Amino acid sequence: MRGIVQAGVGIVLAGSLFASTAQAQYVFVGGGLTVPVGEYGDYAKTGWMGAAGIGVPVGDKGLSVGGEVLYGQNSHSDIDGDKTGLTAFMGYLEYRIGDDSKPGVYLLGEAGVMNHKYKPAGMSYEGGSDWKLAVGGGAGVDIPAGSVSVFVEARFLTRSGTNFIPVLAGVAIPLKR
């Protein structure tokens, strides 16, 4: 497990280091809903998630690379008060279709580590926590709005036993003009 956590943190740090040494072009922050699916959807309710990260374009054809941190929480439908916290460190590749000055569509793929932390209702202890490799992919739309861009996206994230669809909206802020 320690190796998995180190690998995930390494992915995010490598993306962050790459972005900072290449003079990161944007930072972003967003939030929205998580819709549990599969085995996780059998007991978890729709919850919330926040995301923040940095990225840098690679070349001038719409490709970007970066790193992000995700955190969210889902309550459980089977036992009132139980909840699961999700924390992920992900590196990503993104490909945007279209001119940056106009609304555009983007596709993304990501890999990293995710922690699934169970907290039973009314207990002072955690019911279990583990880090595992995670992967995901999705699509979104971004719309230039003055000096920033607003985005709306949907993804599918998976790790052993925990699958969900985050639907996020947020803002990307350029660092270099």
Image (spheres, rainbow, N blue to C red):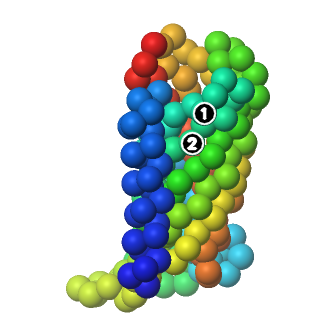
Horizontally, residue 62 falls left or right of residue 90, namely right
The residue under the point 67% across, 81% down is 39
Which image quadrant is residue 106 in? top right
Looking at the rendered structure, the kind of residue marked 1 is Val
The residue under the point 47% across, 27% down is 25
Q: Rate crowding at label 2 as few (under 14), some (14 to 19) or many (20 or more) other CA atoms within 10 Å.
A: many
Looking at the rendered structure, the kind of residue marked 2 is Val
**Vertical order, 110 against 63 (above or below):** below
Report the number of discs: 2
The residue under the point 46% across, 23% down is 174
* Tag 1–tag 2 contact (CB < 8 Å): yes
Horizontally, residue 75 falls left or right of residue 96, namely left
- Tell me which label, 1 or 2, sits earlier in the chain: 1
Quadrant showing the N terminus: bottom left
Q: Which mark is residue 58?
A: 1
**In front of the other: 17 or 55:** 17
The residue under the point 69% across, 29% down is 62
- Measured as percent of width and height from the top left, residue 165 is found at 65, 59
Quadrant showing the C terminus: top left
- Measured as percent of width and height from the top left, residue 170 is found at 51, 35
Q: CA distance from mark 1 to mark 2?
A: 7 Å
Residue 151 appears in the picture as rendered: no
Q: Secondary structure at mark 2?
A: strand
From the image, tell me which residue sits under label 2: 65
- Measured as percent of width and height from the top left, residue 118 is found at 42, 81
**Vertical order, 88 against 138 (above or below):** below
- Measured as percent of width and height from the top left, residue 140 is found at 69, 38
Which image quadrant is residue 3 in? bottom left
Q: Secondary structure at mark 1?
A: strand
